[in-house]
Image (cartoon, helix red, strand yellow):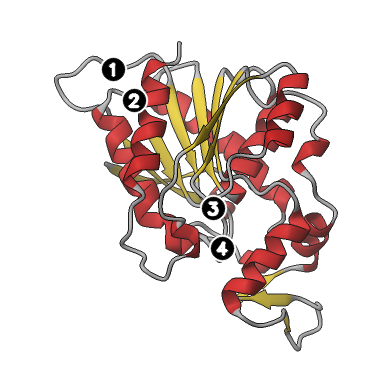
Amino acid sequence: MTPFFFGPKADQLFGCHHEPRAGGAARDNGVLLCSPTDPEYGRSHRAMNRLGALLARSGFHVLQFDYFGMGDSAGMLEDADLGRWCADIASAKDELGRRSGLETTTLVGLRMGATLAALTGAELGGVEKMVMWEPVIDGITYLGDIRKLAASPVVRVEDDHGDTELLGVPLSLPIMSDLVGFELQGLTEPPAKHVMLVSTSESPPSEALGQHLTQLGCEVDLRHTPDTEVWRSDEHAIVPGTAVRSIVSWLKDTP
């Protein structure tokens, strides 16, 4: 695994390139991992690392990266918005192509990462495969889920910007505004040709979202894979092995 920075010098993003296992045949498409955003990012970090490592063992070039304002990337979280994070995904996709020499990139996202991947894929076009693992379908429900994790209402930050905090994570007014008015089923363009829609929760994947993606022209594979919802757990070392293996298997077997 090779860590590095990429992008404009003033706003560099941090990435890690998982190279295919030595001695094995490299596959003809790379995989870009789109992590959840804060406050679910830290809870899911080890699971995403494990997914990247298993994909590399299976012959994929994999790029894992931090969005602007998160992790080791430049910027402050309160200066970010959904549009900026989608631009980060597009930049990371280009970087993976440059490093791997491959023209085709599969997007794999968890929670808000899956949602951002879908938005980016719909805007860019030409994405062959995408894995949407427990995507955030609408912003209001997402904010409600985080409030439940915090067991408290949103706390107003006393500053001049009117920012808020959820689980101690500052969210700018642009992010809050984006989330409050957001619905994934508002997509008007297909995010990818082939989509694996994964749910590890007690409820199966959203049939309504799957139907909407099908209407947009996607070939959708709905998978209900019961496993630990790591983004809700305080045990950061947990890896949902069943879900991770299911994703790796689908990416290996889907043409």
Three-letter amino acid code of the residue under disc 2: Phe
Q: Is residue 93 visible?
A: yes
Q: Which badge, 4 or 2, comes first in the chain's sequence?
A: 4
- Crowd tier of the residue under label 3, counting other residues whose Cα lies within 10 Å: few below 14, some 14–19, many 20 or above: many
Q: Which badge, 3 or 2, comes first in the chain's sequence?
A: 3
Query: Mark 1 to mark 2: distance in Å?
Result: 6 Å
Q: Is residue 43 left or right of residue 181?
A: left
Nearer to the camera, 39 or 133: 133
- Crowd tier of the residue under label 4, counting other residues whose Cα lies within 10 Å: few below 14, some 14–19, many 20 or above: many
Residue 143: x and y, percent?
71, 64
Query: Mark 4 to mark 2: distance in Å?
Result: 27 Å
SS of the residue under disc 3:
loop
> Which mark, by number, is residue 60?
2
Three-letter amino acid code of the residue under disc 1: Ala
SS of the residue under disc 1:
loop
List the residue tagged with mark 3: 36
The residue sitting at the top extreme is 255
Which of the image's four quarters has the C terminus?
A: top left
- Crowd tier of the residue under label 1, counting other residues whose Cα lies within 10 Å: few below 14, some 14–19, many 20 or above: some
- Image position of 230 with respect to 61: above or below: below
- Image position of 250 with respect to 206: above or below: above
List the residue tagged with mark 1: 26
Q: Is residue 72 left or right of residue 248?
A: right
